[in-house]
Image (cartoon, rainbow, N blue to C red):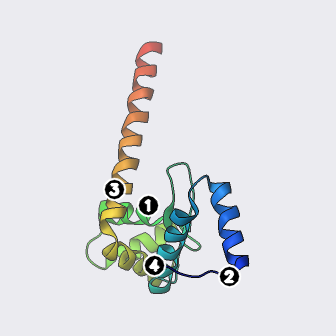
Amino acid sequence: MSIRLSLEARERLQREAARAGEPAASLAERLIDEGLRQRRHPLMRFVDGPTGRRARLGRGPDVWELVSFVKRSAATGEDKVAHAADWFRLSASEVESALVYYAEFSDEIDARIKVNEEALAEAEAIAAGRRQLLG
């Protein structure tokens, strides 16, 4: 597939790609994908961070954080939604929106949860080694 961009859009894309240090075609593909995701899930936004680009609720946590919380919650059934809404100070519909996004992109979110759990385990091991040394 090829698409035609206006001169202004092409220049903005090239400037942003240069800033991001990635090829313009890769950036265009990512932006198109994110735009399509946002059309299906209007409360979602995409943000950059130390661990890469990720989906998040517009005024709330990253989707992986919310899903991880829901998975660990001692509540059952629909009470998990209320528990997460209370914890993150969100509406139930915002939590539902994140869960619907997760249902469509669960592999991506589960991978993000795994990476963060591994980073936490590594940090805990380092802290334990430090405590033992200073013991």
Amino acid on which the number 2 mark rests in the picture: Ser
Amino acid on which the number 4 mark rests in the picture: Arg
Q: Where does label 1 land, which residue?
A: 65
| Distance in Å between CA atoms under marks 2 and 1 | 38 Å
Q: Secondary structure at mark 1?
A: helix
- Counting residues from the N terminus, which is met first, the one under dot 1 or under dot 4? 4
Q: Secondary structure at mark 2?
A: loop
- Counting residues from the N terminus, which is met first, the one under dot 3 or under dot 1? 1
| Image quadrant where residue 27 sits | bottom right
- Look at discs 1 and 4 and give the one toward the viewer: 4
Q: Secondary structure at mark 4?
A: helix
| Distance in Å between CA atoms under marks 3 and 4 | 18 Å
| Image quadrant where residue 23 sits | bottom right
- Look at discs 3 and 1 and give the one toward the viewer: 3
Tags 2 and 4 touching, CB below 8 Å = no
Location of residue 11 in the rendering, given as x and y in whole percent from the top left corner: 71, 70
Q: Where does label 2 land, which residue?
A: 6
Q: Where does label 3 land, which residue?
A: 111
| Distance in Å between CA atoms under marks 2 and 3 | 37 Å
Residue shown at 30%/64% (left/top)? 107
Q: Residues within 10 Å of mark 4 (few under 14, many from 20)?
A: some
| Distance in Å between CA atoms under marks 2 and 4 | 23 Å
- Counting residues from the N terminus, which is met first, the one under dot 2 or under dot 4? 2
Q: Quadrant of the N terminus?
A: bottom left
Name the disc covering residue 77, or none.
none
- Counting residues from the N terminus, which is met first, the one under dot 2 or under dot 1? 2
Amino acid on which the number 3 mark rests in the picture: Ala
- Counting residues from the N terminus, which is met first, the one under dot 3 or under dot 4? 4
